[in-house]
Amino acid sequence: MARIVIKFGGTSVADVEHIRMIAHRVKAEVERGNHVAVAVSAMAGTTNQLVDYAVEAATLYDLREYDVVVSAGEQVTAGLLAIVLQDLGVPARSWLGWQIPIETSDAHGSARIERIETADILRRFEEGQVAVIAGFQGVDTQGRITTLGRGGSDTSAVALAAALNAERCDIYTDVDGVYTCDPRIVPQARKLDKITYEEMLEMASLGAKVLQTRSVEIAMKHRVRVQVLSSFADTPGTFVVDEEEIVEQAIVSGITYSRDEAKITLTSVPDEPGAAASIFGPLADAAVSVDMIVQNVAADGKTTDLTFTVRKADLARAGKVLEDLRASLGYADLRADANVVKVSVIGVGMRSHAGVAQSMFMTLAEKGINIQVISTSEIKISVLVAEEYTELAVRSLHAAYGLDQV
Amino acid sequence: MARIVIKFGGTSVADVEHIRMIAHRVKAEVERGNHVAVAVSAMAGTTNQLVDYAVEAATLYDLREYDVVVSAGEQVTAGLLAIVLQDLGVPARSWLGWQIPIETSDAHGSARIERIETADILRRFEEGQVAVIAGFQGVDTQGRITTLGRGGSDTSAVALAAALNAERCDIYTDVDGVYTCDPRIVPQARKLDKITYEEMLEMASLGAKVLQTRSVEIAMKHRVRVQVLSSFADTPGTFVVDEEEIVEQAIVSGITYSRDEAKITLTSVPDEPGAAASIFGPLADAAVSVDMIVQNVAADGKTTDLTFTVRKADLARAGKVLEDLRASLGYADLRADANVVKVSVIGVGMRSHAGVAQSMFMTLAEKGINIQVISTSEIKISVLVAEEYTELAVRSLHAAYGLDQV
């Protein structure tokens, strides 16, 4: 018998009526002769409500208590789905993070799964019982509840699939798969039948909100076959798989964009050994994570202009840290710009094809879009452009790489 | 340092603003130099919402899963109160039933507390930390969440006070104490300064909804000094204490009524050994609990009329059981009447005073109220009368026993 893990997100468990609908999907999987574990999110809106309560309770709240509060949502869904499954004649029981247990680090609010004990669940699989698991939560070595960060139920499901050595991990969500681009911006976007782990990882990191990044990392590490599909449609979704499974690999698989970027430029920074460290060290200490970095060589050879990007939410904090250090860093001017967007072209095919970057730069140049910063990896090229060009840049690139639906 | 347990009910934790208000009460207790444990209920309305979900999920739900669902409410309040207390500079952490643990029986939905492990809480008391405990919940020997039944947070608090050997257990609720009668019906009702465990137990069982019955049993057994008081007023409440603490004991302490009664009469039941057992046995098997019972000797000496009361919610089920057994039981007729109310007079003083019952019967007779069934214990007399007489009966008795406020 094959083991299947299924995950249902917020809108697919919006209320009891929706929970009944997904229960039928679980039942169908059981009737196909599979052993099934289901990971569930909180009912739509619940997590936001609980987060609001915590924020209202204190501006700086104890993350351990935050985890106690916000993990309650998944607990409710898990109990309800178990009840509904039993009502449909499917033996089922709910499992909370501490009951399995799903052991995590003690980084409350964004803990990492370290180990999942599967013995009890496997034993009950043999008795024909479905395991309904509260997603998003785990327990640390102190016996305190932890949560895995926003989108953490994806990670619960994939980690569970890895631990159970499952044949497949189906992630039911609001969209019916992974697209070549956000269809709200590019109506010609196509649904991909398959995508590699590496590409999915870049897409998740670079703005596509289909899967939590961490879940893709775990899927890649343990070679979990993940399928992203819609709870509201009966069409096949997108499989996230090993590169070898994809016979005809496109050079570029998708275009993403992220508006959650802000650019900081420090002018006339003394060009001497250790300058970068004395800038980025204090930022890291202030928990500001820096993404793209460019440094221009100055004409005089003594100073340089340094440009880098941070998350929009971190911009004010980063500015404060750098202002406080102005004297010791010795830069002339600090320029901040939040009106930027990061546009990325992703594809494992670019490893073996030259000219992908060149097409990108030419396409943008033809539309008169100025590139402010560039960063690349083996399978993606990201550029920072003015935010007002978002749609134009994304649509032009989508067409240029032949991704438009025919 | 004295140990104090405080319990806050639904409306006193209605929202974060209310939670902040009660946090100040907790802080004041800490500043008086006490070690404090707080038991909290779910935010007002939450438990009803969660119960509704469970009922919508299935008519006959698994009580183990019901407990998973409904216990989420107290979890949220406990986390929020811990956050707010920390924000006020009071060290605090939340404790869920399974974390302490509060070990209970496995009677899901109405479990009994069997043991509370206090070592961790006591250790943290020494560090000046307040323990915020999710009320209403515990854990069984299988590691599954249990709940203690409606009003169970009272029981959590009192059991905790017993386990911690606390000096006092303050139960903050919507009313500012225990009254001689329901003030909504008898405006002249007086707040009692003190009441004995025995009286409080009868009051709780007989319709006064101030404390969960089980909590009073535990308080009585372990001699926990319980104070019932209002979270919205700064007046002293009512102490539930040992009889010896009450110097001037009134003969009658209070009048209660319960509309949750229904009467069943079986006519011409064969008057033979084992008849009662063959009626009440099947009812008990069907989980119908029978309260008052009267049996009239028949004129012919061969048959008898049997009258008894059940809870209104159980009336249909009881009727079905008895109809099914009509042939074997051999009764002539089954008469059911849901329009009845049980009115009770309670007071430990009646142990040493004759004539209390006689005054009750005379008072009701003077008002033309017919008594249908009578049941008595050492410290209470209950009568069943037609429901339409509820207010008249209660007010007349309140006046007759000199309980009216002067």
Image: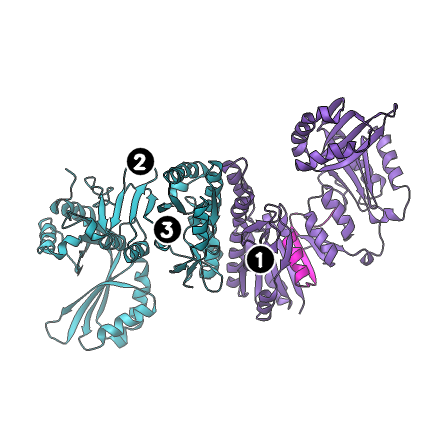
Chain colours: A cyan, B purple
Q: Label 2 amino acid?
A: Asp
Q: CA distance from mark 2 to mark 1?
A: 45 Å
Query: Pointer 3: what residue?
Result: A157
The magenta-colored residue range is B155-179
Residue B145 lies, in percent from the top left, at 55, 51
Q: Residue furthest top?
A: B332
The answer to whether dots 3 and 1 both sit on one chain is no
Mark linked to residue B390: none
- In terms of secondary structure, where does tag 1 sit? strand
Q: CA distance from mark 2 to mark 3?
A: 21 Å
The answer to whether dots 2 and 1 both sit on one chain is no
| Residue B2 visible in the displayed image | yes
- Mark 1 packing: few (<14 Cα in 10 Å), some, or many (20+)? many
Residue A344 lies, in percent from the top left, at 19, 53
Q: Are marks 2 and 3 in contact (CB under 8 Å)?
A: no
Magenta-colored stretch includes residue A295: no
Q: Label 1 amino acid?
A: Ile
The chain letter for the residue carrying disc 1 is: B
Query: Pointer 1: what residue?
Result: B133
| Residue A111 visible in the displayed image | no
